[in-house]
Image: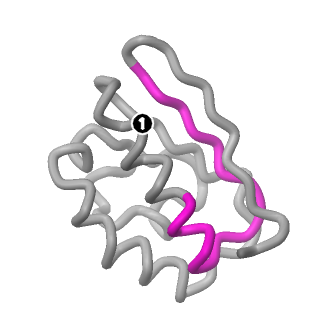
């Protein structure tokens, strides 16, 4: 895991806000996927803020893109924001 990576969460009854901080590598991708699997089903929308990311490693991108299909219907309620949104998002249509 990238030692500098963390996820800051804020959840309301309708939305989950995740702020990604640090470097995004393969372990970071798995950590984000686990949070989404655990929490996305209970909210209407998920916003993932990527501006706090440093380096986005190609391996992290690949892991997240390949495993995002595990999120099934939750994937459509996820929105990526920030200057690294297009690097992290498995689908450009999910970027705001």
Q: As drawn, which residue projects farthest toward the front? A: 38
Instruction: Report the residue at 47% width, 29% height from top.
Output: 16
Screen quadrant of the N terminus = bottom right
Image location of residue 31, percent across then percent down? 56, 61
Q: Please tell me in which quadrant of the rendered image residue 27 appears.
A: bottom right
**Is 59 one of the magenta-colored residues?**
no
Q: Quadrant of residue 62?
A: bottom left
Report the residue that reaches farthest toward the top: 13
- Most extreme residue toward the bottom is 59
Q: Residue at position x 33%, y 26% from top?
A: 42
Pick whichever, 40 or 75, lies toward us: 40
In the picture, residue 55 is in which quadrant?
bottom right
Residue 71 at what x, y percent from top left? 26, 55
Residue placed furthest toward the left: 73
Q: Is residue 44 left or right of residue 26?
A: left
Residue, disc 1: 39
Looking at the image, residue 11 lies above or below residue 66? above
**Relative to 12, is 91 above or below?**
below
Q: Residue 53, image x and y in percent?
A: 71, 60
Which quarter of the rendering shows the C terminus?
A: top left
Q: Position of residue 40 (x, y in %)?
A: 36, 37
Is 60 placed left or right of 40 in the picture?
A: right
Specify start and end residues of the magenta stretch as a single range: 15-31
- Secondary structure beneath label 1: helix
Residue name at image x 37 percent, y 49 percent? 37
User: What's the image's color scheme?
Assistant: one colour
């Amino acid at each position: 895991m990238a030692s500098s990576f963390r996820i800051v969460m804020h959840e309301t009854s309708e939305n989950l806000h995740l702020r990604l901080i640090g470097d995004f590598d393969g372990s970071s991708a798995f950590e984000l996927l686990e949070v989404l699997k655990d929490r996305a089903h209970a909210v209407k929308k998920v916003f993932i803020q990527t501006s706090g990311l440093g380096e986005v490693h190609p391996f992290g991108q690949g892991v997240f893109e390949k495993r995002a299909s595990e999120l099934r219907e939750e994937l459509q309620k996820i929105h990526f924001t920030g200057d690294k949104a297009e690097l992290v998002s498995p689908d450009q249509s999910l970027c705001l």
